[in-house]
Image: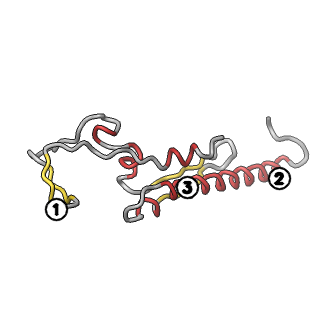
Amino acid sequence: MPVTGKYPGALRAVLTRASRNLLERDAALVAARARVLAPKDTGLLASRISYSVKGTTPETMEAIVIADVPYATAVEKGTGIYGPTGRPIRPKRAKVMVFPGRRGIVYAKTVLGQKPQPFLGPALRSFRK
């Protein structure tokens, strides 16, 4: 419904400010919940969860919550047989993969992958009631 009447510009400004404030609040709550749910090893993943609100009008505004580390998607969705591909991880250019393990260097022709540890999806769903 278009805003008309004696003060349409002022009312539009109030609605825009209120919309931005609500989005900021909700995005901050989702980001805070995601930080709590994020798996902790070094704590880097949780510390890099942030949010922003983009758009200039209530119709175009959107909130974005992001985990700004390269491995965030792998943690959220899993890898290998547990992830989107559903296949074991194999080396691309060598006969074996080499990586540090709990008891020393590991040599493997395939690995199963990492099970998903969702944190962003559950954080968002916890506020969709």
Q: Residue at x 80, y 37 (%)?
A: 2
Residue position marked by numbered label 3 in the rendering: 31
Front-most of residues 13 and 63: 63
- Give the amino acid at mark 2: Ala
Using the numbered discs, state the Cα–Cα distance from disc 2 to disc 3 in whole angstroms: 31 Å
Farthest residue toward the front?
Answer: 103
* Position of residue 56 in the picture relative to residue 44 (left or right): right
* Position of residue 104 in the picture relative to residue 54 (left or right): left
Using the numbered discs, state the Cα–Cα distance from disc 1 to disc 2 in whole angstroms: 66 Å
Q: Position of residue 100 (x, y in %)?
A: 19, 60
- Please determine whether, in this image, residue 47 is positioned above or below residue 70: below
- Give the amino acid at mark 3: Ala
* Position of residue 80 in the picture relative to residue 96 (left or right): right
Q: Residue at x 52, y 54 (%)?
A: 34
Residue position marked by numbered label 1 in the rendering: 104
* Position of residue 118 in the picture relative to residue 20 (left or right): left
Using the numbered discs, state the Cα–Cα distance from disc 1 to disc 3 in whole angstroms: 36 Å
Tag 1 near tag 2, CB within 8 Å: no
Residue position marked by numbered label 2 in the rendering: 10
Give the foreground label among 1 and 2.
1
| Mark 3 neighbour class, 10 Å CA radius: few under 14, some 14 to 19, many 20 or more | many
**Which quadrant, please, contains the C terminus?**
top right
Q: Position of residue 26 (x, y in %)?
A: 64, 52
Dot 3: element: helix
Q: Earlier in the sequence, mark 1 or mark 2?
A: 2
Q: Earlier in the sequence, mark 1 or mark 3?
A: 3
Q: Which mark is residue 91?
A: none
Quadrant housing residue 4? top right
Front-most of residues 41 and 5: 41
